[in-house]
Image (cartoon, rainbow, N blue to C red):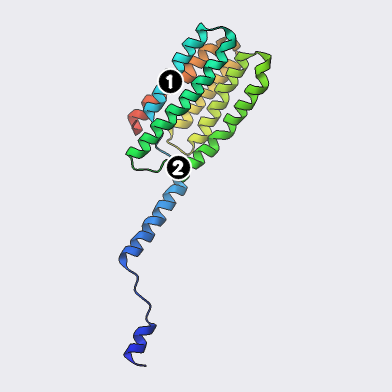
Amino acid sequence: MTNTQSQAFQPEPTHLHEHAADNLRFIRETMENTGRFTELSGLGYVLIGASAALAWLVSNALEPGFEIAVWFVEFAVATVLGLWFTARKAASAGTALWNRSARKLLLAFSPPMAAGGLLTVVLYPTGNLALIQGIWLSLYGVSVMTGGLFSVSIIPVMGMAFMAAGAIALLWPDTTSWMMLLGFGGLHGLFGLLIWRRYGG
């Protein structure tokens, strides 16, 4: 066999940069599979707590029939604040907002929230606002706890605190209004500050 024929059968060498790209791709996929979503914004949680405290003040100043509407508005405001500041933090860190860890977090977070929405629709005609708000606190706590398993370790602790506030509100309905302030206002603010300090805004 001539040298020309021998060279024709030799495999084409793999370039070093192709190996590096494959390795980086593997590392990125591994981190997404096993990693946690760390871009939740501490500043966002602080502002959500402040907006919830304002909603609590407004709802107590209005007629009882309008109170639940105030909290619906607050839910929309909190959602916008949370998404905006989380997206801003992810962008500043050069991280994709909609990565695999974020999808896992959302998948774990959503079912209890959906159950809370359904129970709100079912229970609203009864006029039992204390029961509805106790369910909100409890199921929001479940959502935060389960979703937080795919985020920083302090998030599930916040979820447990919300569940405790919900349990108090359900067992002692006279405390419900204060638990709403303590939970959606106080716990968001407190844990937001802790997240901001440890993991950034």
Residue nearer the viewer, 19 or 124: 124
Which residue bears the numbered disc 1? 49
Quadrant occupied by the C terminus: top left
Q: Position of residue 96 (x, y in %)?
A: 40, 43
* Residue in view at x 42 percent, y 27 percent: 81
* Residue in view at x 51 percent, y 20 percent: 73
**Total number of numbered discs in the rendering:** 2
Q: Quadrant of residue 187?
A: top left
Amino acid marked by disc 1: Gly
Amino acid marked by disc 2: Trp
Residue nearer the viewer, 135 or 165: 135
Above or below, comparing residue 45 to residue 36 in the picture? above
Quadrant occupied by the N terminus: bottom left
Residue nearer the viewer, 10 or 138: 10
User: Could you tell me which secondary element the residue under label 1 belongs to?
Assistant: helix
Residue 144: assigned label: none
Q: Residues within 10 Å of mark 1 (few under 14, many from 20)?
A: many
* Residue in view at x 49 percent, y 37 percent: 149
Above or below, comparing residue 185 to residue 118 in the picture? above
Q: Position of residue 51 (x, y in %)?
A: 43, 18
Q: Quadrant of residue 53?
A: top left
The answer to whether one can see residue 171 in this image is: no
Q: Position of residue 25 (x, y in %)?
A: 40, 56
Residue 98: assigned label: 2
* Residue in view at x 60 percent, y 14 percent: 130
On screen, residue 20 versus residue 73, left or right, reads left
Q: CA distance from mark 2 to mark 1?
A: 24 Å
On screen, residue 108 versus residue 120, left or right, reads left
